[in-house]
Image (spheres, grey):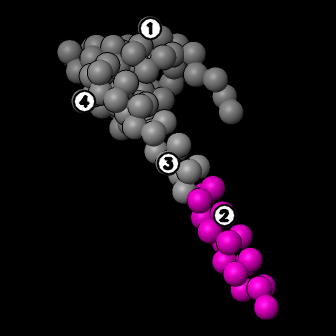
Amino acid sequence: MKRNRFTENQIVSILKEAESGISVPELSRRYGVGQSTLYKWRSKYGGMEVSDIKRLKDLEDENRKLKEMYANLSLKHQMLEDLIQKKP
């Protein structure tokens, strides 16, 4: 996966500049990114604050952990069901 050279905080500050009236082509030239990249950032991070991004990352991390826990419990449950069915 390609490593992004901008952090989420930097992306939010760039988008704040766009909201303040600086044109997308100007921002594109200033930061060396494509205009389509700025529009993708706007669709993903538009209207967010730095605290919102931290909360989003925390929620994504918690969701990943919960999915992993569910997968482990589901596997254990299936193994126990198999054991019960095999008993004579």
Residue displayed at 37% across by 33% down: 56
Q: Nearer the viewer, residue 7 or 52?
A: 52
Report, in whole angstroms, how far the alpha carbon at label 4 lies from the one at label 1: 21 Å
Report, in whole angstroms, how far the alpha carbon at label 1 lies from the one at label 2: 51 Å
**Amino acid type of disc 2?**
Leu
* Above or below 81: residue 51: above
Q: Nearer the viewer, residue 52 or 2?
A: 52
Q: Is residue 86 magenta?
A: yes
N-terminal-most mark, 2 or 4:
4
The residue beneath circle 3 is 66
- Residue 70 placement: quadrant: bottom right
The local secondary structure at tag 4 comes to loop
From the image, state whether disc 2 or disc 4 is nearer to you: 2
Residue 16 at x, y percent in the picture? 27, 17
From the image, state whether disc 1 or disc 2 is nearer to you: 2
Q: Nearer the viewer, residue 88 or 36?
A: 88
Report, in whole angstroms, how far the alpha carbon at label 2 lies from the one at label 4: 40 Å
Residues shaded magenta? 71-88
N-terminal-most mark, 1 or 2:
1
N-terminal-most mark, 1 or 3:
1
- Residue 38 placement: quadrant: top left
Q: Residue 47 carries which label?
A: 4
The residue beneath circle 1 is 30
Circles 1 and 3 in contact, beta carbons < 8 Å = no
The local secondary structure at tag 2 comes to helix
Q: Residues within 10 Å of mark 2 (few under 14, many from 20)?
A: few
Report, in whole angstroms, how far the alpha carbon at label 1 lies from the one at label 3: 41 Å
From the image, state whether disc 3 or disc 4 is nearer to you: 3
